[in-house]
Amino acid sequence: MAYNYLEKVNNNPKLLKEMSYAELDILAKEVREKLVDTVSKTGGHLASNLGVVELTIAMHRTFDSPKDAFVWDVGHQVYTHKLFTGRYDQFDTLRQDGGISGFPNPEESEHDIFAAGHSGTSVSASYGLSEAKRLKRDDSYTIAVIGDGSFTGGLVYEALNNAGRKQSKIIVVLNDNEMSISSPVGSLAKYLATIRTNRAYYRTKNTALDVLDKLPGGERVHDGLTAVKRAAKDYIYQNNNFFENLGFQYMGPVDGHDIKALCRALEGAKEFDDRPVLLHIQTVKGMGYEPAELDPSQFHGISRFNVLTGKPISMPGKKNYSDTFGEYLCEIAAENDKVCAITAAMSIGTGLEAFSKRYPNRFFDVGIAEEHAVTFSGGLSKGGFIPVFAVYSTFLQRAYDELVHDVSMQNQKVVLAIDRAGFVGEDGRSHQGLLDVAFLRTIPNSVIYSPSSYEELGLQLHKAVDNGGKVVAVRYPRGYEGYLPAGYKAKDEPVSIFGKKTAPVALVTYGSIFSNACVAQEKLLEYGIETKIIKLNRVWPIDELALKEALKADVTLFFEEGIKAGGAGEGFATMLLENKYEGDFAHIAIDNTFVHHAPIKVLEDEFSLSPLKMVEEVLRRV
């Protein structure tokens, strides 16, 4: 497929300044075709990227990247930006091992100013960048692009509250694809927005006000006009005045799919040197690809799909860990009317859709606000309920203090259903779930479970709900149940032993990596080496039986799909040391690095957690 305009712009976004608006409209169409075609093969975030095609074109036409810094909130909407900044030829490697990232990555390009992956960070980062520029007497702009969904989190308001107090050259673009304006008022607002986003309007307005202030009595006229204007604007724009109360110049709303209107608005935003600007644009998620427009949630993050139908083409109908969790939680809630489910804007991703419909009074979607979710759960617990907060491992990182102060220290019980624990694959560095065991271990009286099968997930979830503990976590991987040995049976016990207890080599592990250990155990028998697997069903606190069995072995290898520093393996090493273990011990885990994007199997091999690498590790030591 030929992409004539897109190929010209590649690695030279300044060409956008020379193109006519008719040509830019053709370019936007080419970009959408390229996005749909590529993501259908690689998977990725489609709906959000389709929604910001025109905005990205307008930003690159109006500003000079990277001198003018673009900071993208969450960062999953940067595909068009990447196509314009030297990565067109690599775009088919999107999210692939060795290819380009699906998020901003400063290691890839100078145009990717700030790495992102979690929501609500762009205004804070942009404010810091703009202040650094001010201190260096750099008069370039900093543009933060943030979606309305991020405004459900508190960090945005902290940033706006601070940034509004400075005369910084920061422009916040609010990409609103949810809110709407009622028809009669909205029509007037749209008309006035056309005037208010015109660069000439602001120049004329500022000149007129300067003249008025110099005339006798002009100051009183100026103040009176300002009061009338503000009252009218409060009505027309309803509550958008909120941003101006924080010190921002509010502009908009603007049609986010009208390139000319966007360029005019962004040029108008440049006229303000005395305050930061908030430009409100309205877009359609999934714009230009009908399946994504009709079901933007499905196309938020999607695996490979058929372009003609929009249907996924991998693992059709197969149940995963998230689905299984949702089914078990519904069963538990039917038995116990104190059980509540909490999500941070991830009801579909965490498998809670069925729960939300079956038990709407006990389901709480708090928005993208993980910190609030944890403290809110602490309050539910104090009130006599059993909150189950379903959250991706990477997003739980944001709520560490709340877990310490508002749950554990308060002697309250909150169950954490930690999804995407371990490697997540193609989403890369910001989304790998490798830190939860390490930071949860530091919280007094915390309990951590990690199932290796769907059946075990059910057992451990019941145990987490029914039994004691303050912070009780059940962590499970992205995707599907792995290999299980013949005769495997999930057991309600903290430790399971597989193989002869007298075996000279012990493989200690938990969670999904248990499957790899089972394959390695069978392979090692071909070399005449007997091993036993010490499987931690309860990862923390580690049961004495695990220690007892490891002390019998000549070689003990702890394989952990998590960060090495502070991991369960480190705690196990301390236990062995305190009990004067004389054998050969090694802790194989992720050592002091952020893990790049690649298929999970590739990452397991790279970090010596695959069956083959486990076998090699044992053969080196016996």
Image: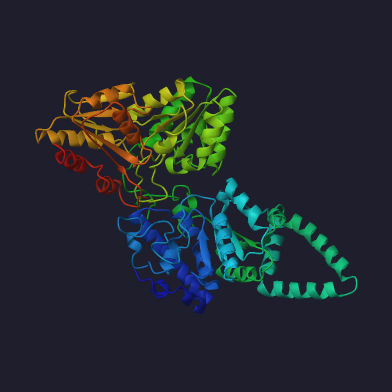
Name the residue located 82 percent from the left edge and 60 percent from the top edge. Answer: 227
- Nearest the camera: 285 or 614? 614
Name above or below for residue 318 compared with residue 448.
Answer: below
Residue situated furthest bottom in the rendering: 18
Name the residue located 54 percent from the left edge and 26 percent from the top edge. Answer: 412
Viewed as shown, does residue 188 lie left or right of 516? Answer: right
- Nearest the camera: 167 or 49? 167
Name above or below for residue 391 compared with residue 176.
Answer: above
Where in the figure is residue 35, as x and y percent of width and height? 40, 61
Name the residue located 19 percent from the left edge and 43 percent from the top edge. Answer: 612
Where in the figure is residue 239, as x and y percent of width and height? 71, 52
Viewed as shown, does residue 224 lie left or right of 444? Answer: right
Where in the figure is residue 374, as x and y percent of width and height? 54, 35
Viewed as shown, does residue 274 lie left or right of 219? Answer: left
**Which quadrant of the figure has residue 195?**
bottom right
Quarter of the figure with the N terminus: bottom left
Q: From this viewpoint, is residue 360 visible?
A: no
Q: From this viewpoint, is residue 523 visible?
A: yes
- Nearest the camera: 532 or 209? 532
Where in the figure is residue 168, as x and y percent of width and height? 63, 64
Q: How are the residues colored?
A: rainbow
